[in-house]
Image (spheres, grey):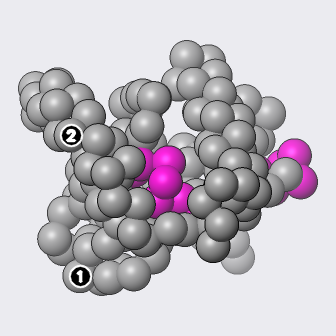
């Protein structure tokens, strides 16, 4: 592909900036008015941090849902991180924007589709270095606050008759 004017990459970069702004708003104000997000990303992409258990279950791509069960959303220049529960086990994940393949907010009937470039070379190495440094801080904070108890365990389930 022509690197001089790589139009898909230029557009993707702009959409990543928009997505970063959306996530930054949510990190401060939370989700409102039934908004919820579906974010798909490549689990094997450079810089993605997931437990081996989750990566084994989703070796290529995963879609996460940001609605009720997420915490500690942190938005950085080249990635975001958050705490999610997978099969009842809470863990911090880190997702570089470059790994994202799609974003959707069904409430707003809004979605973005991204190209995934598996061979970013130097650009992805720099992102990975930034993630590694910031991950130490995020992970250490998450470990300190890992005594959070999920309210789901205390909610009563109501069955319809």
**Mark 2: secondary structure:** helix
State the residue position of label 2: 129
Q: Is residue 101 magenta?
A: yes
At label 1, counting other C-alpha atoms closer than 10 Å, the crowd grade (few under 14, some 14-19, many 20 or more) is: few
Percent position of residue 153, x then y: 33, 51
Percent position of residue 49, x then y: 25, 55
The quadrant of the picture occupied by the N terminus is bottom right
Give the side of residue 106 with respect to residue 150, left or right.
Answer: right
Q: Between 52 and 114, which is closer to the camera in this rendering?
A: 114
Q: Is residue 38 magenta?
A: no
* Occupied quadrant, residue 6: bottom right
> Residue at coordinates 38% horizontally, 48% vertically from top-left?
123
Percent position of residue 8, x then y: 72, 60
Q: Nearer the viewer, mark 2 or mark 1?
A: 2
> Residue at coordinates 49% horizontally, 54% vertically from top-left?
98
Distance from label 2 to label 1 (Cα)? 24 Å
Q: Answer yes or no: is residue 159 visible.
A: yes
Percent position of residue 91, x then y: 24, 50
Q: Answer yes or no: is residue 104 visible.
A: no
Give the side of residue 134 with respect to residue 102, left or right.
Answer: left
Give the side of residue 93 with respect to residue 79, left or right.
Answer: left
| Label disc, if present, on residue 56 of the rendered structure | 1
Q: State the extent of the magenta-drawn residues as a range.
A: 95-109
> Residue at coordinates 72% horizontally, 30% vertically from top-left?
32
Give the side of residue 71 with respect to residue 13, left or right.
Answer: left
Q: Which badge, 2 or 1, is on the more N-terminal residue?
A: 1
Q: Between 83 and 119, which is closer to the camera in this rendering?
A: 119
């Amino acid at each position: 592909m022509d690197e001089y004017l790589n139009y898909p990459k230029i557009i993707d970069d702009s959409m990543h900036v928009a997505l970063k702004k959306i996530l930054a708003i949510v990190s401060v104000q939370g989700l409102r008015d039934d908004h919820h997000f579906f974010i798909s990303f490549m689990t094997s992409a450079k810089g993605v941090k997931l437990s081996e258990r989750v990566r084994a279950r989703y070796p290529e791509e995963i879609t996460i849902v940001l609605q009720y069960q997420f915490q500690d959303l942190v938005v950085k220049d080249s990635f975001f991180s958050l705490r999610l529960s997978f099969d009842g086990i809470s863990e911090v994940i880190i997702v570089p924007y470059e790994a994202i393949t799609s974003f959707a907010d069904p409430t707003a009937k809004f979605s973005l589709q991204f190209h995934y470039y598996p061979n970013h070379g130097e650009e992805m190495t720099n992102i990975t270095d930034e993630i590694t440094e910031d991950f130490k801080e995020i992970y250490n904070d998450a470990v300190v606050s890992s005594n959070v108890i999920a309210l789901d365990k205390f909610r009563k389930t109501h069955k319809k008759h």
